[in-house]
Every structure is written in C-alpha cells, then in structure tokens.
Amino acid sequence: MSNENLLEKLKENVLQGRMEKEDEGIEEGYLGQPGVQELTEETLEQGVSVKEILQTINDGMVLVGKMFEKGEYFIPDMLAASEAVGAAMEVLEPHMIKDKEDWKGKILMATVEGDIHDIGKNLVIIMLKGSAFQVVDLGTNVSSNKIIEEIEKQKPDIVGFSALLDTTMVEMGKNIETMKEKGIRDGVKVMIGGAPTSESFAQKIGADAHGKDAFAAVEVANKLISKN
C-alpha cells in the first residue's frame, strides 16, 4: 500500500473511531481491518514523517467536528474518534520528542482546583497534540500554587484552564490574579474552556481567549501562538 493510501486509511479510521483491528467502526464492514494504532505504526515503518501523520489525524478530527456540528455524529462518535486519536498519539509520542523543532508551541493544561472532571480537557489535549502542540497535562484539581510552579518550570507559551462546574470556574480568575501577583501573567497567554464558561466570562476574568469546544480550542491556540 502506498504512503498516500496509508494516510487516507488512517484518516478514514479516525472518522470510524477505530483504535485497533478488533474494533467495529461507526459503519459496518471494518472489523478485522487495521485500526488507527496499527496504521500509525505502519506509516512510521514506511518512513512517513510525524508531521504528515499529525496533519492527517488533524484533518480527520476536523471532519469529525464538522459532522458533529451537522448532527451526523453524536457525542459517543466524537469520543470514539478522540480515543482512536489517543491511541495514535501513544505510538507517535516517542517520535514526536525527536522532532521538537516541529512543535508550534508549548501548552500547559489543568482542570482547576476543586474540579475533578477531565473528559473535555483530555479531548482538547488530544486535539492539540494532533495539531503539533507540545502539551503538558497537570491533571485535575490543580491548585494555583502548583500552576504557578509549573509555569515557572515549564515556560509554556499558553496555559489552559478547564472547569465543568459553576462553583469551580471562579478558580480560573483566581489563577490569573495569582499569575499577576507573581509577575508572570504577561509572559504567557491564557485560554479557558468548559461547559459553564463563555467568551464574556473569559473577558471578565482577564483571560486571552475562550474555546467553546475542543475544535475551537485548537483554533484559539493557533491564533494565540501566531500573536506571540
């Protein structure tokens, strides 16, 4: 199979949400065929660059987003696709480390203190990695002190705050104020996201941008990096 056909198959299986050959697709007739994990391994073996593979994965997820917006895909379909991409990223990670010059920038991601939800954050991380961003995931229930410590240590271009609860999204504003107090706010862009957040809330707390979903978050990240 040519490299071009391999990449097309990879994108097709992202759309089908198939991690490996034992998985069924959203449509019938895929069982037993190589899934995203096997196809990613094969493309690497064939000498396809990490950059090309990432672009193919990103193209696939963009299509998933469009189908979701049209009502042709539902949340389980989108999650299946993101899990398939996650499997690809595990294969690519060691190779991506070798190609740091290809990273667009570094992003620090955290679910704020008091909030343990991470499904949305994890989907954003997969999408960002697939779009050639280096991402450091601090996890959930992350305190302001930990965030400040990691910003000073990691020197990210962007920090992303996630929250799923009305009661915890206020921590985003507190984090930004703490960043100002420590004198590091001007050196890093801040984007926020999560169900209760909005563009107006982002402006209110002094964040640089708001991502309404994973697809918007990638677009926002690209804009923030270009401004830098």
Image (cartoon, helix red, strand yellow):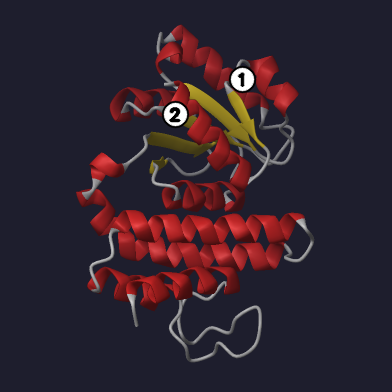
- Residue 54: where, in percent of width, then height? 40, 56
Q: Earlier in the sequence, mark 2 or mark 1?
A: 1
Viewed as shown, does residue 195 lie left or right of 143? right
Q: Residue at position x 43%, y 40% from top?
A: 138
Q: Tell me if residue 112 can be seen.
A: no
Mark nearer the viewer, 2 or 1: 2
- Residue 143: where, in percent of width, then height? 49, 30
Viewed as shown, does residue 16 lie left or right of 53? right
Point out the image quarter for the N terminus: bottom left
- What is the secondary structure assignment of the residue under circle 1? helix
The residue where tag 1 is placed is 173
Q: Tell me if residue 1 can be seen.
A: yes
Residue 225's disc number: 2
Point out the image quarter for the C terminus: top left
- What is the secondary structure assignment of the residue under circle 2? helix
Name the kind of residue labelled 1 in the image. Answer: Gly
Q: Residue at position x 74%, y 33% from top?
A: 166
